[in-house]
Image (tube, helix red, strand yellow):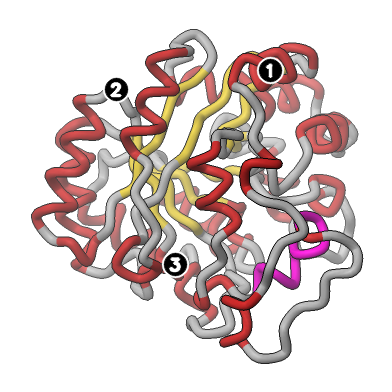
C-alpha cells in the first residue's frame, strides 16, 4: 500500500499551470527543464528570456484522462493521493485552481483528497478562500513562502493560519531551499516554523521537502513541536540514504523519534511514482518504518 501526499493531477488546467514558468521559478528550469522540454533544452542565460521559451509540446499533449490516471495509480499500488493547488496569483498572475481540485476530489472520493491554496497578499479574501476550500471538501491549504516572498512566520500568513486552526485544516509549507534566482534562500528555513507553532500550537503543519539543507534544524523544530510533519516530495529518495548528502538526520530520527511523522510523496509529474517507491523501499530503515513512511502516517494524518 502506498499513499502519495503531493500530486498535481494530469488535467489540462493543471498542466497549463505547471508549464507556465514565471520569473520567480526561473531556477527550476535548470532542474526540470530537460525532463519536460527535451534533452536539447538549454536554460536561457537571461532570466527575462524565460517568457520566450516555446516547449516542444503543448499542455494538451501532457493531459491524461483521470480514468486512465486512476488506472495507472492502481497498477503501481498507489491507493490514494493528495491533490494540490496553490494561490500565488499576486506574485505570478497564475489562476487559482482550488475549485478544480475540489471537483476532482468529489469525482473520486475514494482515491483522492485535496489541498487548496491561499494568497497571504489578498488579506481578508484569503481567509474567505480558506473557508470556501473547507466548504468544498478540501482538507488543507498549501503555500510556498519563497513565491509569496515572505517568511513562514510573516504576520501576513497569520489570518490564514488562524482560519486553518479554527477549521482543523492542515497547512503545507514549502520548507527547503528554492531554486528561485530572485528570492532569498532562507525563505524556506524550518527555523521560522517554530515561531508559527508557538503562536498556533494545535495547528498541524507539513514542512514540505524535508527541510534540506537545514535538515538538522527541521529535526529540532519537530522535536519541539509534535504537530509538525515533513515529507520527502520532489526528492530522489536514494540521496536520502546516501552518506554525505546532508540527509543523515532524517534517516536517524525518521527511523526512530519521528517515524510517525514522515510522509511519502513525489510531486508527480516532477518525480516518477515507481522510481520513488522502489528507492524508499531500499532506504536503511526498519521495515515497519518503511510502511509508516509509505502509507500509515498519511492514513492517520489525512484520514484515508
Looking at the picture, tell me which residue is in the foreground, 243 or 24: 24
The magenta stretch spans residue 283 = no
Q: Is the Cβ of the residue at disc 2 closer than 8 Å to that at disc 1?
A: no
At x 41%, y 40%, the residue is: 226
Outermost residue toward the top in this view: 110
Crowd rating for badge 2 (residues with CA inside 10 Å; few <14, some 14–19, many 20+): some
Q: Please state the extent of the stretch shown in magenta in the rendering.
A: 27-36
Look at the image and tell me in which quarter the N terminus lies: top right
**x then y, percent, for residue 126:** 18, 52
Q: CA distance from mark 2 to mark 1?
A: 23 Å
- Element under disc 3: helix
What label sits on residue 46 in the rendered view? none
At x 45%, y 70%, the residue is: 146
- Element under disc 2: loop
Residue ID for mark 1: 68
Outermost residue toward the bottom in this view: 46
Residue ID for mark 2: 137
At x 18%, y 34%, the residue is: 132
- Element under disc 1: helix
Crowd rating for badge 1 (residues with CA inside 10 Å; few <14, some 14–19, many 20+): few
- Regarding residue 150, the answer to whether it shows in the image is yes
- Regarding residue 6, the answer to whether it shows in the image is no
Looking at the picture, tell me which residue is in the foreground, 190 or 183: 183
Label 2 vs label 1, nearer the camera = 1
Count of numbered circles in the view? 3
In the figure, 33 relative to 59: above or below? below
Label 3 vs label 1, nearer the camera = 1
**x then y, percent, for residue 169:** 29, 33
Which of pointers 2 and 1 lies earlier in the amino acid sequence? 1
Residue ID for mark 3: 191
**x then y, percent, for residue 278:** 87, 31
Crowd rating for badge 3 (residues with CA inside 10 Å; few <14, some 14–19, many 20+): some
Amino acid at each position: 500500500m502506498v499513499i502519495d501526499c503531493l500530486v498535481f493531477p494530469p488535467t489540462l488546467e493543471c498542466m497549463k499551470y505547471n508549464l507556465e514558468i514565471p520569473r520567480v521559478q526561473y531556477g527550476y528550469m535548470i532542474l526540470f527543464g530537460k525532463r519536460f522540454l527535451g534533452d536539447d533544452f538549454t536554460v536561457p542565460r537571461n532570466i527575462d528570456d524565460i517568457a520566450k521559451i516555446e516547449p516542444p509540446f503543448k499542455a494538451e499533449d501532457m493531459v491524461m484522462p483521470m480514468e486512465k490516471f486512476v488506472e495507472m495509480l492502481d497498477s503501481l499500488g498507489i491507493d490514494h493521493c493528495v491533490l494540490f493547488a496553490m494561490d500565488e496569483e499576486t506574485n505570478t498572475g497564475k489562476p487559482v485552481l482550488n475549485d478544480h481540485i475540489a471537483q476532482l476530489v468529489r469525482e473520486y472520493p475514494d482515491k483522492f483528497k485535496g489541498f487548496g491554496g491561499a494568497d497571504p497578499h489578498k488579506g481578508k479574501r484569503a481567509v474567505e478562500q480558506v473557508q470556501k476550500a473547507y466548504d468544498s471538501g478540501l482538507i488543507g491549504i498549501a503555500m510556498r513562502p519563497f513565491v509569496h516572498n515572505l517568511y513562514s512566520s510573516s504576520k501576513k500568513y497569520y489570518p490564514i493560519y488562524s482560519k486553518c486552526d479554527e477549521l482543523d485544516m492542515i497547512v503545507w509549507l514549502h520548507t527547503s531551499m528554492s531554486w528561485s534566482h530572485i528570492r532569498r534562500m532562507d525563505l524556506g528555513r524550518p527555523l521560522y516554523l517554530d515561531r508559527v507553532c508557538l503562536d498556533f500550537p494545535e495547528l498541524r503543519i507539513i514542512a514540505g521537502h524535508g527541510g534540506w539543507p537545514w535538515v538538522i534544524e527541521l529535526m529540532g523544530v519537530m522535536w519541539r513541536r509534535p504537530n509538525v510533519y515533513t515529507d520527502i516530495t520532489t526528492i530522489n529518495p536514494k540521496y536520502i540514504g546516501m552518506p554525505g548528502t546532508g540527509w543523515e538526520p532524517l534517516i536517524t530520527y525518521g527511523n526512530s523519534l519521528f517515524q510517525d511523522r514522515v510522509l511519502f510523496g513525489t510531486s508527480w509529474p516532477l518525480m516518477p511514482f515507481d522510481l520513488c517507491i522502489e528507492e524508499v523501499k531500499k532506504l536503511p530503515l526498519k521495515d515497519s518504518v518503511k510502511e509508516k513512511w509509505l502509507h500509515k502516517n498519511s492514513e492517520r494524518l489525512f484520514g484515508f
